[in-house]
Every structure is written in C-alpha cells, then in structure tokens.
Image (tube, helix red, strand yellow):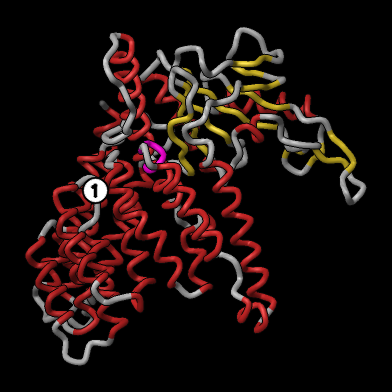
Amino acid sequence: MMLFRSIVMRSAAVALSLSGSVASLAAQRSLPVTAAEAAFHVREQEEAIRDAISFRQAHYPVDSMLQVIAGTGAQWLAHLQGDAVHGMQLDPSSEVGASARQDAYAKAQIAARLATPGLSFRDKAFTYLTAVQSFTNEYTPERFPIAEQYLDALDALGDSAAYWQLEARKPLIQAYFHLGRSDDVIRIGVRALQLVRVLSFHDRGRLLPSRGSDMYAMVIDALAGRSDGRPRIDSLNRMLESSLATPPHLAALDSEFIEMGMSYRQEFTRLIAATSKLGTMGAPLVSNYWLNRPSRDSAIIPVSDGKIHVIEMGSYDCPACVIALHGMQRLHNSAPDIAVVMLSWTQGFWANRLIDADEEAAHLTTYFLDHEHITIPIGIWKAKKAINEDGGLTPENCGPNLVTYPAAGKPMIWVIDGRGMIRHVFLGFSRETETQLLHIVQFLQREAANRSVGRDARPTLQGS
C-alpha cells in the first residue's frame, strides 16, 4: 500500500509540475505552444509514468496511471482551446483531445482537418491513421467503434493508402489480442497481412518483428484456435512468402533489394517455424542444469502431466527477457498450481571474459537467485564448446529446447495446456501480456474442469 501510494503521489507530482509548466507557457505569449508540442508532452508524460513502474513491482496501478494521463491531456487541451488551431496542427490537437477523453473535441479537429481545401491524399490518409491511433486503447474498449469508423474511411481510399491502412491496424490488432477478442484479431489482422501484397517492397518488412510488429504472431495465434485455422494459415503463409521474395525487376535494379528479400525470408521462416507449433503436442523440457528444483542435475520435465505450462525462452543479457521473467514469477505467484518455467543457455562468456559452461552457470545462478530473486524453475543448457568456422571455441548449440521450441525472437512465451498441446505463442512481453496470460490460464483451467465432467470443451480461444 505504501508503495502504491508513493507511485500515485509521484505521478500526481509530475502532473502538478506539468500543470505549472502549462501555466507558465500560457503567460509567455511570445512562446506559443503548438498542438504538436502539446501532443508530444502528453506522450512523454505517458511514457514517464509507465517507466516509473518498476518491472519488478507486483502491482501495476493502471487506473491511477490512466487518470494522470487524462489529466495531463486536459491541462494541455485547456491551453490549446485558448488559441486557434489550423492546418496540420489539427492532427496533434485531436490526439490531445482524445488523451483528455474529450471525444467531441477530437472528432471536431479531425473533421476540420479533413475539410481543409486542397488537402492532399497523403495528408488525408495520415489524418485517418492519427484518428484510429487516438481512439485505440485496450483500457477504453468502448471507443473501438470510433476507431473502426475511421479505419473504414481510410480503407475507402483504396490500395494507394495501403501503408497507412497497415499501420492503423497494428494498434487495433494488439488491443484486441490482449483482450482475447480472437474474432476481431482475425477480422482486422488477416486484412493487414493481405495488404503486404500492395505495399512497396521496402515497406513489406513492416509486418516483421525486426520492424517493431508482432501482428503476424497474434493473427496466427488467433487463427490456430479455429476449425478452419490451419488451411487459412497455410494460405496466408504462401501469400506472404511470395510477397516477401525480391521481385525480378528490383533484383536487376540493385543488389540491395536481393539482400533485403533474403533478410525478410530468413526472419519470416523463423516466424513460421515457431507459430507452426500451435495446436501440436509440446515436447518435454530438457536441461543439464536446473535452478529451483530439488536437484540441479540434468532432468527432463514432461509437459503432458495434467498441468498447464507457461514457458519463457530467453537469456539474462536480454532486457526484455528479464522483464518477462519477473512477469513469469508474478504469474506463478498468482496461479501456483500451474508450471511456470524459464529455459535458457550458456553463451561462452561473462562480461568481457571467455569462460567455460560450468563457470558461466555459476554466474547465472548468482544472477537469477541472488540478484533477481527468482523462485520458478530455470533450465540452463550448459553447452559444450566446439571449434567454429573461424578456428575459435564457441558453444556448439543452445540445447535441444530451441529445436523443439524455435525462437523467432526473444523472449518467446509458450502456453501448453494440461494435455500437452501448445495453445499460445507470444513474441515479446509487456504488462498487458502478463494480464492476458493470467486470463488464458484461467480459461484453460475452466476448459479442463469442463472436460473432466464430460462437457464439450472444444477450444475456440475466444475470450481466452
């Protein structure tokens, strides 16, 4: 309680400080604040509040955070309403209005921008994109219909607006996915993937994780729970593989396009390898060194033992993996009846020293147990070193788990039901992912209970 109160007080202090800065700016008429600057400050405030919550902290005060963000938006909006907003400043002013929960104001700004005489095609598409993003937030799902109305208008612009149509769908896919609304993920997401065919070749990589998008994994995850999911997934994969291959005319123009196509194909192949496991039986977890088990000796853990398993594949030197690890620890604390495990591997070095697997495992033990205070089982594959192609000694592999649970990135989160079937695959991690994981676990527990009493428990994953 003391920690929560401290967080809220810090957030309030930041908001009060911001309020003072707004008042100061209002007094200095020689330094007017543009709508773009106001929108920037609102986004910065939101990021600052999220960053103030440690990933090690159990409580995530979403309601208080949203309240402070809305208050910040209202303060900046009050200043903007004192001045006339014109032209391209109408787009960011609509963002500020939406952040302040002043939907009527935000809609009016969008309408005014769209009514601008001589507005270019690109500017119109950008305005619709801004509108969709402004009204998309998983914590305010009642505003999704507004976002989708603007998305429909953006779609009406045709294939020439494909870039903006794709970018507008990304936040909607993520929000629907975190809320477990699989039908909506499929409806919005399949169209997003189909848009790749009409994008410029340079922009086709925007569906890949390396370009900041996890939407492919989300869409495939949603489709995998459908009776017709596999043929639809196969059809999408064939289309995407073809679209990500370098067109002959670009290959003839510049070898850079050939390298781009190869990069796309390699990353997409990894994505397919990981997501193709959905709906299949999981393999036992194998490691030759374990933490937080009765023995640190080699062990094989079955995943078809009646327990739900949530598995993180990651490493200590990956910041997102450490953040996810603390989320896994909290998941275990919230649902102690499930099996939560992290799987990792040695890399042949520690800091700037080359070391053997046993010494590295000792460092990892200290790091995970004494520094991070993790209590869930962690399997560390101690890899033997072998001579590499350059004549040096490096670990020969990362162990069998990365073969049976291929990684398209780090961290990867795998959810396996009590029968041993892989039900979900997550690429990346956030607090929203953590909440969704808990909902999925609860859904799978209800499903298993229904099955035990003979009810039809055919999984649809809708609402999970």
Residue 290 is left or right of residue 464, and the answer is right
Decide which of 74, 337 is in the foreground and name it. Answer: 337
Image spot of residue 460 (x, y percent): 31, 33
Q: Quadrant of the C terminus?
A: top left
Whether residue 183 is situated above or below residue 398 in the rendered picture: below
Q: How many marks?
A: 1
Seen as rendered, the residue at the extreme right is: 391
Q: Residue at x 60, y 21 (%)?
A: 284
Residue 246 is left or right of residue 98, and the answer is right
Q: Which residues are magenta?
A: 222-226
Image spot of residue 337 (x, y percent): 40, 13
Whether residue 427 is situated above or below residue 376 in the rendered picture: below
Amino acid at the residue labelled 1 = Ala
Label 1 Cα crowd, 10 Å radius (few <14 / some 14-19 / many 20+)? few
Decide which of 181, 45 is in the foreground and name it. Answer: 181
Quarter of the view holding residue 21: bottom left
Q: Is residue 19 visible?
A: no
Q: Residue at x 40, y 66 (%)?
A: 195
Whether residue 269 is situated above or below residue 355 in the rendered picture: below
